[in-house]
């Protein structure tokens, strides 16, 4: 059973999320796989990670800023943002920063304590894939994108507020 929603559909996850990566020996065991490494591992082992045959993505803890990716930002096909608890909303701000201010166009994935009730709001901030917490029913979670018919505010997915959309 897939535990990933991507572009509002069930998907098989082809990426391996690594909680930590501390040595060159560890990199070798994942050489052929598509891996998502913590930002700290990317910063420390960047050259070795770039030489792998498999793809490499990065994930940011909630206190890490997207600007820390520097010039590497647009080289990633996927950036994951971690929610340590459902109440920690810093990754929402990071998602908007990546999409609106830094122009990131790749896959933006929510990881960690990701619940059904957050999906609609996460998608409005720019997330397009969601690795749900293990206890979440993925089929039920898919319905979250239709919880609301319309939104008043400006967002990544809707750049005009409702009153401007109605006026045109």
Image: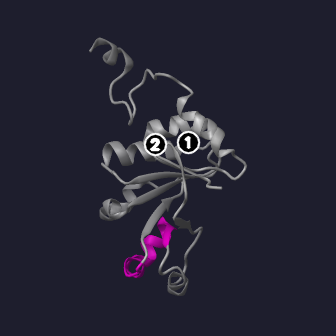
- Residue 50 lies left or right of residue 1; in this view the side is left
The way the protein has been coloured in the rendering is one colour
Q: Could you say whether the residue bearing mark 1 is in a helix, strand or loop? A: loop
Which residue is pictured at 40% across the width and 76% down the height?
46
Q: Is residue 21 magenta?
A: no
In the current view of this chain or complex, which residue is farthest to the left?
Answer: 168
- Residue 142 lies left or right of residue 43; in this view the side is right
Q: Which mark is residue 89?
A: 1
Query: Do the residues bearing badges 1 and 2 touch, measured as CB atoms within 8 Å?
Result: yes
In the current view of this chain or complex, which residue is farthest to the top?
Answer: 167
> Of residues 12 and 132, which is closer to you in this image?
12
Can you give x and y, in whole percent of width and height, for residue 15 in the image? 52, 65
Image height of 76 relative to 48, above or below: above
Distance of label 1 from label 2 (alpha carbons): 7 Å
> Of residues 84 and 134, which is closer to you in this image?
134
What stretch of residues is rendered in magenta?
Answer: 34-53
Instruction: Say few, some or many: other residues with alpha carbon within 10 Å of mark 1 (under 14 / 14 to 19 / 20 or more).
Output: some
Quadrant where the N terminus is found in the figure: bottom right
Can you give x and y, in whole percent of width and height, for residue 60 in the image? 50, 58
Image height of 40 relative to 150, above or below: below
Which residue is pictured at 65% across the width and 47% down the height?
85
Q: Which mark is residue 93?
A: 2
- Residue 110 lies left or right of residue 158; in this view the side is right
Q: Is residue 37 magenta?
A: yes
Can you tell which quarter of the image residue 106 is in? bottom left
Can you give x and y, in whole percent of width and height, for residue 75 in the image? 32, 64
């Amino acid at each position: 059973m897939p535990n990933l929603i991507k572009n509002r559909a069930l998907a098989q996850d082809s990426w391996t999320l690594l909680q930590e990566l501390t040595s060159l020996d560890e990199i070798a065991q994942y050489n052929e796989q598509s891996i998502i490494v913590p930002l700290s591992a990317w910063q420390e082992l960047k050259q070795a990670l770039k030489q792998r045959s498999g793809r490499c993505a990065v994930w940011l803890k909630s206190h890490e800023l997207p600007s820390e990716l520097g010039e590497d930002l647009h080289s990633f096909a996927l950036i994951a943002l971690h929610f340590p608890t459902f109440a920690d909303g810093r990754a929402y701000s990071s998602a908007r920063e990546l999409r609106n201010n830094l122009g990131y166009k790749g896959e933006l994935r929510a990881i960690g304590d990701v619940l059904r009730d957050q999906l609609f709001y996460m998608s409005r901030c720019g997330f397009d894939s969601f690795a749900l917490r293990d206890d979440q029913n993925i089929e039920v979670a898919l319905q979250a994108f239709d919880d609301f018919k319309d939104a008043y505010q400006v967002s990544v997915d809707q750049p005009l507020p409702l009153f401007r959309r109605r006026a045109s």
